[in-house]
Amino acid sequence: MHCVRKVTDTLYWVGANDRHTPLFENIHPIPQGVSYNSYLLLDEKTVLFDCVDWSAAPQLVENVAHLLNGRALDYIVLHHLEPDHGAGLWAILQRWPNAAVVSSLAAQRFMDQFGFAPAGGERIVAKEGERLSFGRHAITFYAAPMVHWPDVMVSFEETDGVLFTADAFGTFGALNGKLFNDELDFPHAWLPEARRYYANIVGKYGPPVQALLSKAAALGDRLKLLCPLHGPVWRTDLAWFMGKYDLWSRYQPEDNALLLVYGSMYGGTEQAAEALAIALAERGVDVSLYDVSTTPISHLIAESFRCSHIALASVTYNMDFFPPIRDLLEDMKALNLQNRTFAVMENGTWNPAAAKLLASFVTGELTGCTLLEPKLTLRSTLSQSQAPELEAMADAIAASLRP
Ligand code: FEO
């Protein structure tokens, strides 16, 4: 059975939802699934915009065959060749071998490397600013390299104001029948997953995202719809979502809030982090508390993109800080997280060493990040006599958070 939805009078969503894959890119948990979006334009020419993951290729073929209803498929436009969008090309070309494949030059190279397209078919290389007409509709290509692979292009369809955005403006989460952002409670139910998708998949590439936002802004009022490769189609509140992308890609926090992450072995550091969270809440601080050992790192990365302040509480482990805390900091560095204010707390039963090393990492390895004083040192547990030290740390964090 086909599963399609109309986007405009002539454009259809023909993608598929994946509720089976546990890890996106075999790294990031996706308990609510993910969608692989493809779109089909029916004009004088027929055009498939992007394919799907290999696991969803049978559904894509069924959807396209249903809408074509015996017509030929003239073009396949691939904005991005990563296998979650490119692997389904093989199945499409098995069914419609005469379709011309349109993509960037880099995508054509990747297509061959992955083996997604047999040799001999017609291929068209799209370049920045080039226009391709399909009848009543035409698209103009814009390069968007490193959003999030070097092959990425986006295209703008002029008649209906559709921007095909590749991975940009994507979201984790299967669509559950609701295709459009205004059919969802996006700001509450979906924004955390959109942020987690952005921060972990595209977060490293802030400047390329800024370049894409500039190109989108130049479209002005002609821009009506955002059609990404994952998650809902945007037909309202485009400026709101693009504003989130602007903040994230400039590494500016969304919220004046504290992310508090602890790495604890036997509960002493956890208890101190709990006590700090209470002291902060009593001071009106918006604090979120996580155990680094049990929280997927992609969630902590997303929270670090949201919050202005980050407090780390770590045991000393092999004369270093806790390995999962190191993994988190290394991931922050890899994803270019910048412009945050940190506070640190250490624990060590006989030789606490974590705080100095944490401070060195934060100020030496992360761009534009600063460290608050005082630090706090525990010896196995937070003793009652250290209550004033905890209060002083809470005061310093709360004062720094005050606008
Ligand atoms: Fe959804 Fe970069 O692929």
Image (cartoon, grey):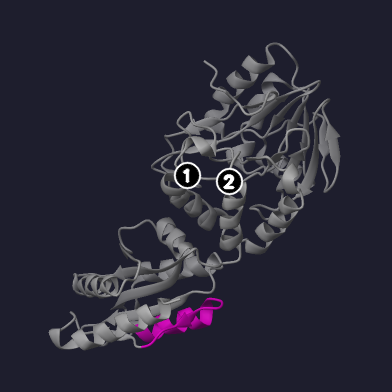
Q: Amino acid at mark 2?
A: Asp
Res 186 label: 1
In the image, 89 versus 304, the foreground residue is 304
Q: 336 or 279, which lies in front?
A: 279
Dots 1 and 2: beta carbons under 8 Å?
A: yes
Residue 77: percent from left, percent from top: 73, 35
N-terminal-most mark, 1 or 2: 1
Q: Quadrant of residue 97?
A: top right
Q: Is residue 47 left or right of residue 327?
A: right
Q: Which residue is at 77% across, 48% downward?
A: 142
Position in image of residue 24 (x %, y %): 48, 45
Q: Nearer the viewer, mark 1 or mark 2?
A: 2
In the image, residue 365 above or below residue 53: below
Crowd tier of the residue under label 1, counting other residues whose Cα lies within 10 Å: few below 14, some 14–19, many 20 or above: some
Q: Is residue 375 above or below residue 130?
A: below
Q: Residue at x 43, y 61 (%)?
A: 303
Q: Nearer the viewer, residue 350 or 390?
A: 390
Find disc 2 in the rendering and name its residue.
237
The amino acid beneath tag 1 is: Phe
Instruction: Give the SS element for disc 1.
Output: helix
Q: Is residue 305 magenta?
A: no
Question: Element under label 2?
Answer: loop
